[in-house]
Image (cartoon, rainbow, N blue to C red):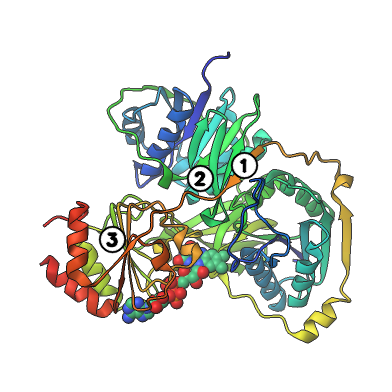
């Protein structure tokens, strides 16, 4: 195939313990370490490996969000993507609208394969890839943990609740990636330097003629109810008594 | 005031059985409205016999066709979209089945989807977890907009099966179906132990268990207690156990009455999968392991000493 498109979301780094805004309007992201959504990083790694094995010529990355997303796109370019597209959008945007914008990019670029993470670790929605697939009328393979590229199709192993499912899908297709697909490479300093020269197209989300106003109303974002604090016990005997008292095991 | 909302729940079935996640989804639906229909796309008349017994269901709608021997989302989405015309709300369980399928239907309905409803505050206001459950979003669907959502099974109990709902057998809708997706097979580790998502006791092991062979003592303990066995991502990645045993943000979200974590450090992504458990027992040799911050009962011990003693005690 000529091109692979990889969609990348900027999220709070997975190691950060999030804090909620006092007015309950959301999660604090100012001054917090931001990264590529880990699942998207795996998607990009998968794309790069397909290119390196000679099965694709170009890897394009696209992100939708504020100007700061350029940082994550530069990281993606340093990993090895050939060029980047940023669709600038400064407000909250729902997966359906993201998918509609991505659909426009798919129409422009006609990639043979589109890779996305199975979910973003901030909103945990798990929607965008499937939505894009339906908008494009393409097949999908979600939760992929193994990928084999054939001439006009892909064979994908999917991690589903029942075990491992094998699907064959015709290209062009959409694949969303799970954790065990690969381990993304580390970027090296020279690659970061080189990435600065790679092309980055910057577009405005308002220029696509799609209504991006949220359709659902977020009333509040609050901390989860705390679990009652626990006790420390010493050894099997004490545990046995505690569990019997709670009626959790019987003898 | 308009009439009660009409809800369609799409059933998930496996090996000829309607899943417990489906009955949990029906429970969520019944908290939104009293008019709940259940849709089955299958190829097995036994499914409809099970379906009409599910409490809170008014009508069971069924399409029997060999197309549904494989549950492929790209094929089912246009059918469900068509059959759910006239409904105000469509709910699916937030299992890999529902997560794969629902967004495609949402596109055909041109509505934004809600993932993982964990609580119904009013017929149009729901709570859902974000950031691996470290924050809870309260979200409202404006009047007039169809609700398309997945329901987090760990947050709802299953409804009973003492009903006698009416049954409508529907024709396969006349829609051009895609042929770009082929099912090649599924492999699952067969086990006699209860399913992770329904078991009342779950015994999980992490990297601290050290090897696939060492998991044997966890299986022994599980069998003594009638429990299911789960694992952390590190244990799955290291090849100690199969992927379908992973518990956490990106594995299974479970809510047993009793959860044991052996040799699991307590990363937020793991905790996300066990937060709804009744009692969490953690055994770890590191007194500073973060798992002790959320465990109801913590024990600092070497699991290789602790479990054999526990087994002896249960004899
Ligand atoms: C995007 C993303 C998603 C993720 N999703 C998940 C998920 O769904 N589920 C999940 O589990 N993880 C998930 N993770 C991984 C998670 O961050 C942790 O890396 C993982 O949970 C660690 O597993 P562990 O606790 O088994 O291993 P470790 O963190 O290595 O902990 C091992 C523990 O075993 C203890 N130990 C060692 N030997 C013994 C002994 N003999 N007796 C008693 N205790 C012992 C140690 O003290 C230590 O606390 C995800 C990560 C990312 C980035």
Q: Are marks 3 and 2 on the same chain?
A: yes
Mark linked to residue B98: 2
How many residues crowd mark 1 within 10 Å: few (<14), some (14–19), many (20+)?
Answer: some
Task: Give the image quarter of residue A220.
Answer: top right
Distance of label 2 from label 1 (alpha carbons): 26 Å
Asked if residue A159 is positioned above or below residue B285 in the image, the reply reads above
Mark 3 and mark 2 lie on one chain; the one further toward the N terminus is 2
Given residues A236 and B209, the one toward you in this image is: A236
Question: Residue at the spot x=60%, y=56% of the render?
Answer: A119
Query: Can residue B212 be seen in this snapshot?
Result: no
Horizontally, residue A72 falls left or right of residue B190, namely right
Task: Please tell me whether mark 1 sits on a helix, a strand or a loop.
Answer: strand
Mark linked to residue A220: 1
Q: Are marks 3 and 1 on the same chain?
A: no
Q: Are marks 3 and 2 in contact (CB under 8 Å)?
A: no
Q: Which residue is mark 3?
A: B191
Task: Give the image quarter of residue A230.
Answer: bottom left
Given residues B187 and A214, the one toward you in this image is: A214
Which corner quadrant of the figure contains ligand 1?
bottom left
Task: Please tell me whether mark 2 sits on a helix, a strand or a loop.
Answer: helix
Question: Residue at the spot x=18%, y=54% of the render?
Answer: A245
């Amino acid at each position: 195939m000529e091109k692979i498109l990889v969609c990348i979301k900027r999220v709070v780094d997975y190691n950060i313990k999030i804090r909620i805004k006092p007015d309950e309007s959301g999660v604090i992201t100012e001054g917090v370490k931001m990264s590529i959504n880990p699942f998207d990083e795996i998607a990009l790694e998968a794309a790069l490996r397909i290119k390196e094995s000679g099965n694709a010529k170009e890897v394009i990355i696209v992100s939708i969000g504020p100007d700061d997303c350029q940082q994550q796109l530069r990281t993606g370019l340093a990993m090895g993507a050939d060029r980047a597209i940023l669709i600038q959008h400064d407000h909250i945007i729902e997966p359906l609208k993201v998918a509609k914008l991505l659909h426009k990019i798919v129409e422009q670029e006609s990639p043979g394969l589109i890779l996305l993470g199975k979910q973003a670790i901030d909103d945990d929605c798990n929607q965008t890839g499937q939505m894009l697939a339906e908008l494009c009328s393409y097949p999908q393979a979600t939760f992929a943990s193994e990928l084999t590229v054939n001439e006009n199709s892909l064979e994908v192993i999917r991690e589903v609740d029942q075990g491992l499912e094998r699907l064959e899908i015709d290209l062009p297709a959409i694949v969303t990636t799970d954790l065990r697909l690969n381990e993304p490479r580390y970027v090296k300093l020279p690659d970061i330097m080189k990435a600065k020269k790679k092309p980055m197209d910057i577009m405005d989300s308002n220029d696509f003629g799609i209504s991006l106003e949220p359709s659902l109303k977020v009333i509040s974002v609050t901390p989860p109810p705390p679990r009652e604090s626990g006790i420390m016990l010493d050894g099997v005997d004490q545990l046995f008594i505690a569990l019997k008292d709670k009626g959790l095991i019987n003898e | 005031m308009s009439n009660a909302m009409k809800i369609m729940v799409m059933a998930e079935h496996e090996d000829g059985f309607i899943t417990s996640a489906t009955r949990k989804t029906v429970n969520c639906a019944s908290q939104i409205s009293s008019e709940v229909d259940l849709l089955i796309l299958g190829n097995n008349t036994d499914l409809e016999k099970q379906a009409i017994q599910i409490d809170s269901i008014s009508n069971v709608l069924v399409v029997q066709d060999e197309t549904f021997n494989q549950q492929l989302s790209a094929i089912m989405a246009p059918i469900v979209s068509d059959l759910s015309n006239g409904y105000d709300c469509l709910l699916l369980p937030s299992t890999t089945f529902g997560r794969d399928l629902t967004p495609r239907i949402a596109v055909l309905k041109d509505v934004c989807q809600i993932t993982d409803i964990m609580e119904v505050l009013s017929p149009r206001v729901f709570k859902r977890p974000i950031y691996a459950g470290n924050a809870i979003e309260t979200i409202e669907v404006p009047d007039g907009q169809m609700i398309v959502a997945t329901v987090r099974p760990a947050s709802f109990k299953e409804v009973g099966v003492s009903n006698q709902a009416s049954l409508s057998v529907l024709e396969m809708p006349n829609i051009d179906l895609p042929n770009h997706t082929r099912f090649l097979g599924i492999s699952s580790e067969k086990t006699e132990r209860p399913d992770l998502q329904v078991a009342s006791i779950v015994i999980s092991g992490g990297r601290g268990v050290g090897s696939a062979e060492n998991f044997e003592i966890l299986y022994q303990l599980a069998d003594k207690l009638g429990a299911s066995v789960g694992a952390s991502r590190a244990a799955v990645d290291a090849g100690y156990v199969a992927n379908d045993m992973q518990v956490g943000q990106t594995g299974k979200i479970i809510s047993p009455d009793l959860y044991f974590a052996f040799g699991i450090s307590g990363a937020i992504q793991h905790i996300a999968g066990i937060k709804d458990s009744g009692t969490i027992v953690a055994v770890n040799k590191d007194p500073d392991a973060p798992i002790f911050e959320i465990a109801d009962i913590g024990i600092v011990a070497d699991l290789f000493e602790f479990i054999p003693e526990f087994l002896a005690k249960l004899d």
